[in-house]
Image (cartoon, helix red, strand yellow):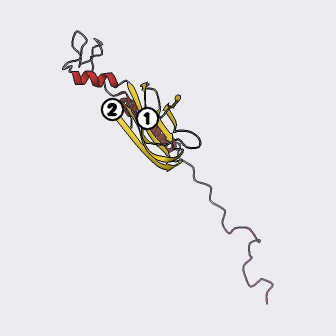
Amino acid sequence: MTNQPPYPPQQPYGQPPFPPQPPKKRSVGKIVGLGCLGIVGLFVIIGVLAAVIGGGSSGDKESGKSPDKTATGTKKNDTKSDTKKDATDDKVVFKVWGTAPAGALGGLDIGYGSDSDTRKGTFQDGKFEATLTLDKDALYYDVHAQLQGSGDINCSVTADGKTKTGHASGGYNICNAQLSSNFTGGWS
């Protein structure tokens, strides 16, 4: 017999049989390209939003005239119904109506106004109505009325030709109606 071991020599414990592979190098061009594409996409989205929000004005910008006005400054096809509509377009109307007997805490608790101007109202003879000047920068207009134990009431807020309504019945329920500004300058 020889003094050679019957098996080939083994590697020391804990050492892998093969050296680990080096990590893959990232391609700088791909990362930069994606970043540039993202920036270009952002500018495109901002441009589209600006066009939608700004809305292409159909007026003559050079002369400062609006296309729906005559040389004298009056609107074309101006009728009495158009004049009446124009007079109320810059107003917000708040209403509460119904039956609401005074409870232990008194009559209806009414609040109305915008996000920057809140007021209190008084319910008399089964109704309440108030009018404010429309502020195009307001985020919302609302009216709310809380019953004081019993009753059945309705409420509404109207601005720029749009109306929202609400209803409450019995107990200490609250009637609420709110118009919110949308990003195009209208109300919903």
Q: Is residue 172 above or below residue 159?
A: below
Residue 166: x %, y % from top left: 42, 43
Q: Secondary structure at mark 2?
A: loop
Q: Is residue 58 magenta?
A: no
Disc 2 crowd, CA 10 A, few/some/many (<14, 14-19, 20+): few
Q: Is residue 7 above or below residue 177?
A: below
Proximity of marks 2 and 1: CB atoms separated by less than 8 Å: no
Q: Is residue 82 left or right of residue 160?
A: left
Q: Is residue 14 left or right of residue 85?
A: right
Q: CA distance from mark 2 to mark 1?
A: 27 Å
Disc 1 marks which residue?
A: 125
Q: Is residue 75 above or below residue 5?
A: above
Residue 104: x %, y % from top left: 59, 43
Q: Is residue 4 magenta?
A: yes
Mark 2 or 1: the one toward you: 1
Q: Amino acid at mark 1?
A: Asp
